[in-house]
Each structure stands twice: as C-alpha cells, then as structure tokens.
Amino acid sequence: MVEIKKLDCGFRMASEYLPHVQSAALGIWVKAGSVDEAKKEEGISHLIEHMLFKGTETRSAKEIAQAFDRIGGNINAFTGKEATCYFVKTLTSNLETAVDVLLDMLLNSVFDPMELEKEKNVIYEEINMIEDSPEDDIHDMLDGLVFAGTPLESPIIGSVETLSAMDRNDIKRYMAREYVRDSMVLSVAGNFNEERIREIFEGKLSVLGADKEIKTYESELYVPQYLVKAKDVEQSHISIGLPGLALDDRLYHAMALLSNIFGGSMSSRLFQNIREEKGLAYSVYSAASSHTKHGIFCIYAGVSHKNVAKTIEAIKDEMRILKAEGVTKGELSAAKEQLKSNYIFTQESVNSRMFSIGKNATLMGRVRTPEEVLALVDGVTMDDIMEAAEIMGNIEKYSGALITRQETDLKSLILN
C-alpha cells in the first residue's frame, strides 16, 4: 500500500513497502524544472542536475561513482518540464550507504567553477546531439509551438547562450529558491526500514528552505503555428500537435486510450494505414502527454522527402474517419487491455513504482492505488472517447513542425 506522510521538517515521503523483494529504489523529487526558469535561466535546472554529480565537500566526482560501484548500486537523475529527480537503486542492505551519498550530493555539492565550465561543454555536446537527431529536435520544435505563451514552451536543455552566462552564484540562488522542503518529495519503493529512512531525512533536510514562492502567469490564447527547418537530412520528419489534457482532466484516460487506437501500437490506425498499407513511413505514431496544467497530443512520421504531402494527407484522412465514425467496441476493448497490461508490467519493478508514486505525489499531491487506476481505465465509455476525438480530430487546430531538405509550405499541406 502506498502511503504519503509529511515529516516533521515539512518534507513529504511517499512510500510503498514490498517485503518480498531484496532491493529498494529511492528518489528525491524536486518540483522544479524548465517551467520554473526565467528566460535568462533557461537550462539551469538541467545544469544543476549534472553538477550534483561533480563533487561535494568530501567526495570527488570519481569518489561518488566509486561509492555506488562498491555496493553494486545504481544512481542517476533526470530533469523534466516540471520536476527533477535524483534516484538510487540498491540492495536493501546497502540502502543507507546509498542515501548517505545521495544526500551529500544534494546538500554539499561545491559547484567548482572549473567543473562547471567543463560540464557546460558536456551539455553543449548534448545540444549538438539533439540537433543531429531530427526526431528529438522536432519534438522540441513542436513543444515551442503548441506551448507558446506558457512556461512549457522552453526546451529543458536550454541554449548555449543562456548556459554560457551562468555561474556558481546563479546556481546557488536558483537552488535556494526552488530546492525547498514544501516542494520536494522523498519517494521509496521496495524492501526498506521506514523508521530509519524517516530518521535520516528528518535530520538532514531541515537545513533547506521551507516554502517555495507560488508563481502565477497568464497563458496566451493558443493559435496554431507552423515551423519548417531546412536541413540536409536523409529523411523528412513531420510532427503535428495541439493542446491536450492536464494530468487531472476527467478525459485523461480516454485520451490515452484514443491515442493508442489512433497511433500507439502496431495495430493502430496510423501504423496500419501509413506504414503497412501505403508503405509511406518506417516510424509513425501518436502520443498524448500531460502536465499539471497543460497537455499535448502529437503525431509523428519519418518519411522520404517525396512523401511528405502524401503522409500528411493520409493522417488527415484518418482524422476524418475518426470524427465521422468513431472507434469500434473491439478497438476500445483492445486498447484498454494494452493500457492495463503496460501499467501492470511497470508495477513489477521497484524503480517503476518509485517513479510512479514520486511523480504523482510531487505533481498531483496524491497517488492512486493500482485498483483505482485499473478501474478508471475500465470505466472509460464510448461517449468519453468521442469527446476526446472532438479534441484531437480537428486538423485546423494543429500546429506543425517539419525538418526537411527544402522549404515547404507546411501550413497549406495541413489546412488544404
């Protein structure tokens, strides 16, 4: 059973005790990501994530890595739009050692100026890698169009311009503002001593600030936009999308199911039509992603340059059919089984359980039981699906991004 408790220091702990395993996964979640950054700070959340591995007052970067190698544990981190997570997985017998190193990184990192400049160069290479991976690049392009006027429009990784201007003081100021107890969650799943974990964190985290300032903003009215990047690529990359649903929207699961039917599996309509029947693309899919206040539904296809127009038209044809005819009972039933199966499969990993309860406790302030999740999926009706189809079925509301060799009138291809 998942429990969420507030420690005396104000830090929240979301935990799931699993006595039948011999390992545990533990994550420190910070409700701070690219949405919390000012324009000149873009990329700082991700930069901090990197820098916490670069040395503390008592451990070098190499010693941090060696500490985990000695206990056979894994340590990693990731930065998202709305949260950053630092996490470990280890044998139950070594969990306290892993936590000691993780807390040292969180509380005592030195942010050495020389290491900072070296790590900036690492991230510049990461930016170049994204530029060299059109499928990654185009998703950032589409986010910028669909989320324009909201804090979600900026890329998580930032830019060379913003990162090059950052120094140690900028990092310290940002962490003092964002790494505070009321916006952080300890997530742990597996076999662990809850009393001992609580004791460790109570004693260590009181040095952090207590409260995060609540930010407010007014979203601009969404207007579809179109962006074409001419680049010497072997294949054209198409991505179209429109605003989707927030995490707590009542149609959240309906949209997930509809996305699965439309383009989320090998039997989906997009895959069967565009790849199997027409042979236009090797990779084609749709995806629904949600955040606390916004969401996005997108469609991607990688095609030969000569097939861009044909592929967009085929996508539009499938949208017309969806709006006119809806989905079948068989399609909905199969999508439910796929969604439930994928969810249950993740529940068999302590890492996945830690991620699930940590993300939901951090962003939503609550965690649903597996029984509640499965009931919500089963409870989606055909009427719910049609409501979701009304959201995603209007091609004139889609923004579009295209990476291709030549200038293309993408707007006309989508709207005409």
Image (spheres, rainbow, N blue to C red):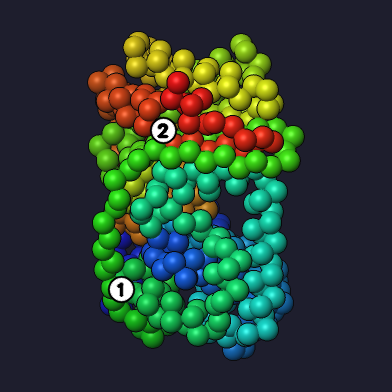
Residue hosting label 2: 398
Name which residue lies at 68% across and 84% down. Answer: 114
Disc on the earlier residue, 2 or 1: 1
The three-letter code of the residue at mark 1 reads Lys
The three-letter code of the residue at mark 2 reads Tyr
Q: Nearer the viewer, residue 130 or 363?
A: 130
The kind of secondary structure element at disc 2 is loop
Residue 337 in view of the camera: no
The kind of secondary structure element at disc 1 is loop
Name which residue lies at 49% across and 80% down. Answer: 170
Where does the image place residue 334, in percent across and percent down from the top left?
44, 19
Q: In the picture shown, does residue 240 fall above or below 80? A: above
Question: On the rendered structure, is 340 left or right of 91?
Answer: left
Q: Nearer the viewer, residue 81 or 108?
A: 81
Q: Residues within 10 Å of mark 1 (few under 14, many from 20)?
A: some
Residue 138 in view of the camera: yes
Where does the image place residue 204, in percent across and percent down from the top left?
42, 82
Residue hosting label 1: 212
